[in-house]
Image (cartoon, rainbow, N blue to C red):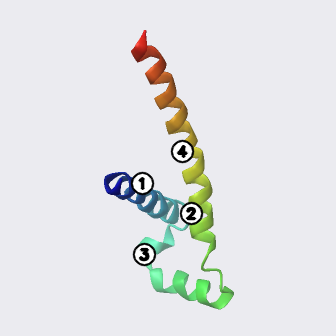
Amino acid sequence: MINILKKELTIYTALLTLLIFLMHPDMLSDPTIRLGLMQDKANYIHPLLYTFFVYLILFFLRAISGFIAKLFEKK
């Protein structure tokens, strides 16, 4: 159970990092300005919510592909 949680947390963290750099490429050059903008607007939760929605989509796609793989494995 702990291994599954570690795996899913690793996937979530990697997805969060990927989405941050895709949506805000200025995080690589000057992250303090971006973090300052987040503090001014007080929108701390939106990266976690966007990542959660993308993670749910990936989770369902992984579940469906695993189910299909099991169907072909039994035959």
Instruction: Tell which circle, 3 or 2, labels the residue nearer the N-terminal end.
Output: 2
Amino acid bearing label 2:
Met
Amino acid bearing label 3:
Ser
Q: Residues within 10 Å of mark 3 (few under 14, many from 20)?
A: few
How much space separates mark 3 and mark 2, taking CA atoms?
14 Å
Instruction: Tell which circle, 1 or 4, labels the residue nearer the N-terminal end.
Output: 1
- The reply, left or right, for residue 6 in relation to residue 33 is left
Q: Nearer the viewer, residue 16 or 66?
A: 66
Q: Nearer the viewer, residue 35 or 70?
A: 70
The nearer-to-camera label among 3 and 4 is: 4
Element at label 2: helix
Q: Residues within 10 Å of mark 4 (few under 14, many from 20)?
A: some
The nearer-to-camera label among 2 and 4 is: 4
The nearer-to-camera label among 1 and 4 is: 1
Q: Residues within 10 Å of mark 2 (few under 14, many from 20)?
A: few
| Disc marking residue 58 | 4
Element at label 1: helix
**Residue indicated by mark 3:** 29
Instruction: Tell which circle, 2 or 4, labels the residue nearer the N-terminal end.
Output: 2
Amino acid bearing label 4:
Leu
- The reply, left or right, for residue 2 in relation to residue 49 is left
**Residue indicated by mark 2:** 23
Element at label 3: helix
Amino acid bearing label 1:
Glu
| Disc marking residue 8 | 1
